[in-house]
Each structure stands twice: as C-alpha cells, then as structure tokens.
Amino acid sequence: MLKNGTMGQHSPTYQPVVEEITIGKLKLMTFDRGGHQQARRVWRDYYPAVNALVFVIDACDKQRLPESKLELDLILSDELLKDRPVLILGNKVDLPGAASKQQLLNDLGLNHLVSGKDKTTHSQLKSHPVELYMCSILNRHGYKEGFEWLGQYID
C-alpha cells in the first residue's frame, strides 16, 4: 500500500491488511480486504465505517473486467455507500496490453457516472462522487492525483 505518498507492489491480498497512509496533507486509514471471492463476502461489513472507497482494477486483466463491473455495480448501488466518494484506480498501465482509460470507462459502464476531475462540490452531483484514474502503482504514478481528488470529498 502507501507509505508517505508511495505505494509498494504487493502480492494479492489473502489476509486483511490495515495501514495508515499519508499523501500530502491527506492521512488515511486503509482497510485492504482483497478482491478474491471469499474476501468479497465481507466487504459490506465495512461499509458503515468507511468515508470513501478505493477500487483497484488490473487494467491488464481484461478477462476479469466483466467480473469487476459486476462488483463495482454492486458497490455503486449499495445504499450504505450512497454518499461516499469512490475512487477507481486502473492499475498496471505501464504494461503492454493494458486497457486504456476509455476502454475501462466503457467496459465498466462508467461514462455517465464519473464526476469529473474538477472541483465539483458534493451538492452539485446527482449521486456520490465517482472518478477513474489510470496509474502504475509499481512505477509510482497516477494514483497520487486520484487520492488528491478523493481528499476533497472526505470530511
């Protein structure tokens, strides 16, 4: 995860991981529950306690995009998260064959859901803030801007 504005490369999460991260003036307590099927069953248990959600997608694993869309649709329609900002990170853009931002927007059905990267206030939005940022966690680019966007919606 992140430490002092940098992210490290992790193996898939099989055990819950809790970390405090700092990016600029933004200090966050993160709960990484993993994305495998067993972990997804408990995601909802954490929703009442979160101020925001970060959904990381492997932009190189195009075969799993329909599965990602299904899970993201469930998250975005859940009443427990209706006012929470959702940052989607399209990771691994540094690898050959990675999906483009437009492809992820299309495949995930996000074209009409993203809020825009300008400073749109929460009250100006029809739903909770949602935005997609493309990044390479390994090469340490793209995610900082996403967290800065997210920070404007966290009280």
Image (cartoon, rainbow, N blue to C red):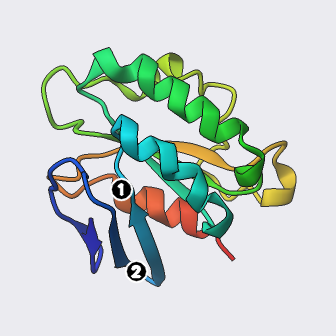
Q: Is residue 125 left or right of residue 21?
A: right
Judging depth in this view, the residue of 76 and 89 nearest the camera is 76
* Residue 110 pos. (x, y %): 59, 27
* Element type where label 1 sits in the image: helix
Residue 89 seen in render: no
Up the image or down, 58 lies above or below 7; here it is: above
Q: Residue at x 27, y 59 (%)?
A: 15
Judging depth in this view, the residue of 37 and 98 nearest the camera is 37
Q: Which residue is mark 2?
A: 24
Please, what is the three-letter code of the amino acid marked with disc 2? Answer: Gly
Mark 1–mark 2 contact, CB under 8 Å? no
Please, what is the three-letter code of the amino acid marked with disc 1? Answer: Tyr
Residue 143, numbered label:
1
Q: Residue at x 45, y 56 (%)?
A: 146
* Element type where label 2 sits in the image: loop
Up the image or down, 101 lies above or below 83; here it is: above
Q: Residue at x 33, y 62 (%)?
A: 16
Judging depth in this view, the residue of 15 and 128 nearest the camera is 15
Q: Quadrant of the N terminus?
A: bottom left
Quadrant in the rendering for residue 31: bottom left
Up the image or down, 85 lies above or below 90; here it is: below
